[in-house]
Amino acid sequence: MARNLLTVAEIKAATKPKLRDGDGLWLHTSKSGSRSWVFIYVRHGRRREMGLGNYGTGTGQVSLSAARVKAEEIRTILGRGGDPFTEMEERKKKAKPMTFGELADEYIETMSPKWRGKQTKPAWQRFASTYAKGLRKIAIADVDTDAVVRVLTPLWDAMPETATKTRERIKLVLDHARARGLRTGDNPAEWRGHLDQILPTPKKLVRGHHAAMPYSEIPAFMKRLQAKTGVAARALEFTILTAARSGETRGAPIPEFDLDKAVWTVPAKRMKEPREHRVPLCGRAVEIVKEMRKIAVNDLVFPGQKLKRPLSDAALANVLDDTGASEFTVHGFRSAFRDWAAEETHHQREVAEAALAHAVGDAVERAYRRGDALAKRRKLMDDWEAFCLGSTSKT
């Protein structure tokens, strides 16, 4: 394609509003008489015009030769499939780098429409303004491991739950930044294989009144639990493997289970949140239900001592006492599961929340109803079973 069609003399003598120098470079004259360089190209069917500055030889103006240099840089960028609006050197120098705080605020506004919980957005805003304050002014591309650790260290022992959520949210913002091309490389907030080599795993986490056994102790505990006999021991084992609430397990009737498909469907009326919850059953959970059906005395999978009555919550607590875990609670195993999923796996946060029957936003709920989340949660629960029972991960 022809290039360098103009001369300085022709430009001075020209009366046309648009002059072509060739291969995308044009000189436009406005109604007021000012002249400016424009580079025009078509990408993906879209016509783009890129201003290169006013024509002239004075300070801040662009001569014919300088315009041609800029045009050649644009052609090179386009030739490799790039975007000259962001990749030209002079534009990169002028562009103010986005900070972590700016991107975190944008992320919150972008994602908040799908967050169902009323407290989710305020919690994220507290994270962005308070807990991650030390990162706010750092350019998003420059956030590194040292910066993340400085933010997390004051929280790590004093506020372990807040520290865990802060790390997860930092990771999400940085993942978002990489997806938008604002940073490259590994995520410095990644736990597994990175921060777990720098920060200690919290030994004990208390949420409300639900003391949670550290997930690192669960495999040894499960061996002690499986050595116990009785309905309560099997109910506790089943509850841990499914990350269910105690009441959901204790009140489960046999018709809720489809063992051929390895799915337990808990109706809305038995859930804390009034919506149906499907639970993918790992192999050991299916075995437990089959074992209990062989000795069934009523339609409950885990019957209590009184006719047609389920096990009491105290019965499961007694099993904890008998296995040397009296300082922990049954409900705390849900917390341990959530910590394990966040710190030891690459499963999505939304999948782990869905496994706990937590509300995780409209988009995820739609996927859940289509069955996609069920398939993802099955992989998660199989990994949880492998961890609890000390076997090899299935994914």
Image (spheres, rainbow, N blue to C red):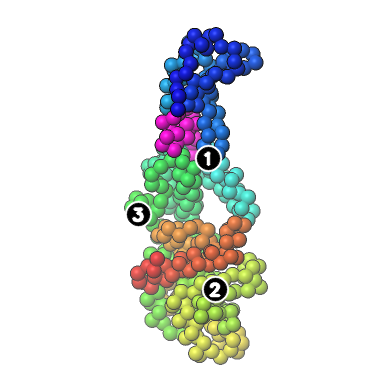
Please provide percent x and percent y for residue 40: 53, 28
Badge 2 crowding class, 10 Å Cα cut-off, few under 14, some 14 to 19, many 20 or more, is: many
Secondary structure at badge 3 equals: loop
Horizontal arrangement in the rendering, residue 133 relative to residue 389 (left or right)? right
Q: Which mark is residue 193?
A: 3
| Closer to us: 134 or 89 | 89
- Which residue: 45% across, 60% down? 347
Instruction: Tell me if label 1 and label 3 are in contact, CB under 8 Å.
Output: no
Q: Which mark is residue 44?
A: 1
Q: Which mark is residue 246?
A: 2
Residue flagged by tag 2: what amino acid is it?
A: Ser
Q: Going from the N terminus, do you reach mark 1 or mark 2 first?
A: 1
How far apart marks 1 and 2 lie (CA) works out to 56 Å
Please provide percent x and percent y for residue 172: 49, 49
Farthest left residue in view:
197
- Which residue: 47% across, 52% down? 168
Q: Going from the N terminus, do you reach mark 2 or mark 3 first?
A: 3
Part of the protein shown in magenta: 74-101
**Which mark is nearer the camera, 1 or 2?**
1
Residue flagged by tag 3: what amino acid is it?
A: Gly
**Which mark is nearer the camera, 2 or 3?**
3
- Which residue: 45% across, 34% down? 78
Q: Is residue 79 in view?
A: yes
Secondary structure at badge 2 equals: helix
Residue 68 in which image quadrant: top left
